[in-house]
């Protein structure tokens, strides 16, 4: 009887702890240092600037690169497969992209870290 009680208590405690750690998803929600800008503004910003853009992805260019457009223009964005989350987008789906400006010699792109459906 004591042995089965100990096993039951151990199993119950373990399942509670395992459930807690597996279900732990979350993070900080609040102010950050990203700036909401237009594509034309983003193209003029310094390398590594943290920005947020809202618009649509008009086409896939391959190799995780896409053409993104808002009312001010278009630019190339790079979205790693894991950064899409659960978002599925078409050229008609308004999205918000969070990322940082990546400037090379003659090219400016957005390295996207998060994709959300725009409100």
Image (cartoon, rainbow, N blue to C red):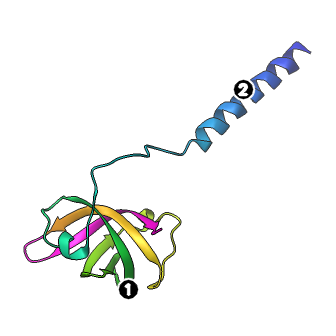
Mark-to-mark CA distance, 2 and 1: 51 Å
The answer to whether residue 51 is left or right of residue 1 is left
> Does residue 33 appear in the picture of this structure?
yes
- Secondary structure of the residue carrying tag 2 is helix
The answer to whether residue 63 is left or right of residue 21 is left
| Mark in the foreground, 2 or 1 | 1
- Mark 2 and mark 1 lie on one chain; the one further toward the N terminus is 2
Does the magenta segment cover residue 2?
Answer: no
Q: Residue at x 47, y 84 (%)?
A: 92
Q: Residue at x 35, y 47 (%)?
A: 31
- Please state the horizontal and vertical placement of residue 3, each as a whole percent of the image: 85, 16
Image-quadrant location for residue 108: bottom left
The answer to whether residue 77 is left or right of residue 22 is left
Between 29 and 5, the one lying in front of the other is 29
Q: Residue at x 20, y 70 (%)?
A: 42
In the orientation shown, which residue stands out farthest toward the top?
2
- Please state the horizontal and vertical placement of residue 118, each as a whole percent of the image: 45, 69
> Does residue 63 appear in the picture of this structure?
no
The residue tagged 2 is: 13
Between 77 and 44, the one lying in front of the other is 44
Main secondary structure of the magenta stretch: strand
In the orientation shown, which residue stands out farthest toward the right?
1
The residue tagged 1 is: 58
Query: Circles 2 and 1: CB distance less than 8 Å?
Result: no
Give the residues in magenta: 104-119
- Secondary structure of the residue carrying tag 1 is strand
Q: Judge the density around disc 1: few (<14), some (14-19), many (≥20) Cα neighbours within 10 Å.
A: some
- Please state the horizontal and vertical placement of residue 41, each as a whole percent of the image: 19, 71
């Amino acid at each position: 009887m004591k042995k089965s009680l100990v096993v039951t208590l151990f199993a119950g405690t373990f399942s509670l702890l395992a459930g807690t750690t597996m279900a732990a998803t979350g993070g900080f929600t609040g102010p950050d240092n990203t700036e909401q800008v237009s594509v034309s503004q983003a193209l003029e910003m310094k390398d590594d600037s943290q920005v947020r853009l809202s618009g649509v992805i008009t086409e896939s260019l391959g190799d995780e690169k896409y053409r993104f457009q808002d009312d001010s223009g278009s630019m190339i964005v790079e979205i790693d497969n894991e950064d899409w989350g659960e978002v599925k987008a078409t050229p008609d789906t308004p999205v918000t992209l969070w990322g940082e400006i990546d400037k090379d010699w003659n090219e400016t792109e957005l390295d996207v870290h998060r994709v959300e459906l725009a409100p």
